[in-house]
Amino acid sequence: MIYVSSSSVYVTTLLGSCVAVCLYDGKNNLGGMNHFLLPSWNGNGLASPKYGNIAIKQLLENMEKKHSQRKNIIAKLFGGAAVLDQHSDVFRVGDRNIAMAKEMLREFRIPIVAESTGGDKGRKIIFDIITGEVRQKYIQKTNVNKK
Amino acid sequence: MTKINDKTLLHLLKEQLKKKRNLEKENKQLLKEVKKLNQKLLESESFKSHFISNVTNEIINPFSSVKGLAERIIHLKAGEMKKAHSLAKLIYSESAFLDFQLMNIFMAAHLETGEVKMEISEFDIPHLINEIIEYLKPEIDKKKIAIETNYYPSLSEGEKLLFKTDREKLRFILVNLVSNAIKFSNDGSLVTIHIKTEGDNFEIKVQDEGIGISKENLNEIFDRFKRIDKKIHSLNPGNGLGLSIVDGLVDLMNGKIYIESEKGKGSIFTVVIPPATNSELLSDEDGLFIDDEEEKF
């Protein structure tokens, strides 16, 4: 998912192992957010924004189409938790998503000014596109009754 | 003034030549990659339009069939119950096929936009397998396929085998694999479903005695719009989405998928899924416990 706007909107999403990159252009009061599931597209099938390397690139391109300049853009990073228990999360999708996001932002020279990543709890985030502020709440795990 | 002697000059020339050769090599490689990408683009365009016309047919045809069959039932006389029953069965079969095609298309679209969420529950595996076989009964009966199910370790009559993951996603994966096995099998042949629970993981193998896949085509098999052999495709209608969706869902569930196949000798598709041990992987927001405490960034 990718969303970019210059209108007065809040963008909200829920994150488990997925990562959301919030980009904000303070000069033009313009922002955008993506939400990706997996770190990188391996070249097979369609290049979909469910992959981090595609989603981040497309988010930035969408902002530039709305006349944003990279030098004015900052990033805030959220998500990438290990919401499955450690033994099951053998593929460490959350960690890999975070690493991909940081690598891509470094490549595009976009500074990460804030982040809330990793851990073992899901997150709900609300991104205020006009001010660039992100509010976050953690999602509690529930207990499972074993049969 | 610095004197450059012959030895130094020769060395400099050799360095320049080496650089030139490296650049040429790099250029050749880049050109190769551009040609490859171009080819992929052309293939993608061609298969996309092929897919669209194919999907259109596979939705329109069953609908027309259903309409025609219903019309025939309307015009039946009193006392033609047997004929009505027979026509109704055909309607059911066409509807089931359509339901399956549409499910695949929607799932593919959702996977593409990243909108698929996991809903975890604990459920009985044999019950799920029986449900899948029942769902695919029209296809199974049409081709007179024999379906065998084996459990390792074996289960006694009525014994449950519980597993915790997203039941609907797993059902989707298995329906596609078993449906493919039936589709590419000859009439009257055997499809075997092997279920193994080793340690925590759940492993399922779907084995058929059908046409198999050549080595060259194995790598391309999960490509979303590609059907391996256009000739086979025309005999076995399908839009090629099924396996790419299976791949996407297995990925989402942190699982793995393997294929063993030989052209003309059948295939074995193996899926290994680890259990989900938390009851939520963030599904419906209303069911979540969200902290009161809020942080600002």
Image (cartoon, coloured by chain):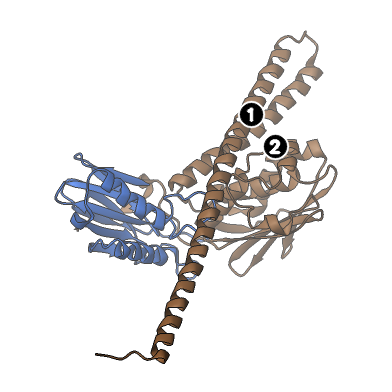
Chain colours: A blue, B brown
> Label 1 is placed on what type of residue?
Asn
Residue B42: x %, y % from top left: 55, 44
**B129 over A8 or under it: above or below:** below
Q: What residue would you read off at disc 2?
A: B237
Q: Is residue B225 left or right of residue A135?
A: right
Q: Residue at x 54, y 59 (%)?
A: B32
Q: CA distance from mark 2 to mark 1?
A: 10 Å
The chain containing the residue under callout 1 comes to B
Q: Residue at x 61, y 70 (%)?
A: B199
For the residues bearing labels 2 and 1, Cβ distance under 8 angstroms: yes
* Marker count (numbered): 2
> Label 2 is placed on what type of residue?
Pro
Q: Residue at x 39, y 62 (%)?
A: A97
Q: Residue at x 59, y 50 (%)?
A: B223
Q: What residue would you read off at disc 1?
A: B57
Q: Quadrant of the N terminus of chain B?
A: bottom left
As rendered, which of B21 and A52 lies closer to the eye?
Answer: B21
Residue B56: x %, y % from top left: 60, 29
Residue B294 in sight:
no
Residue B63: x %, y % from top left: 63, 24
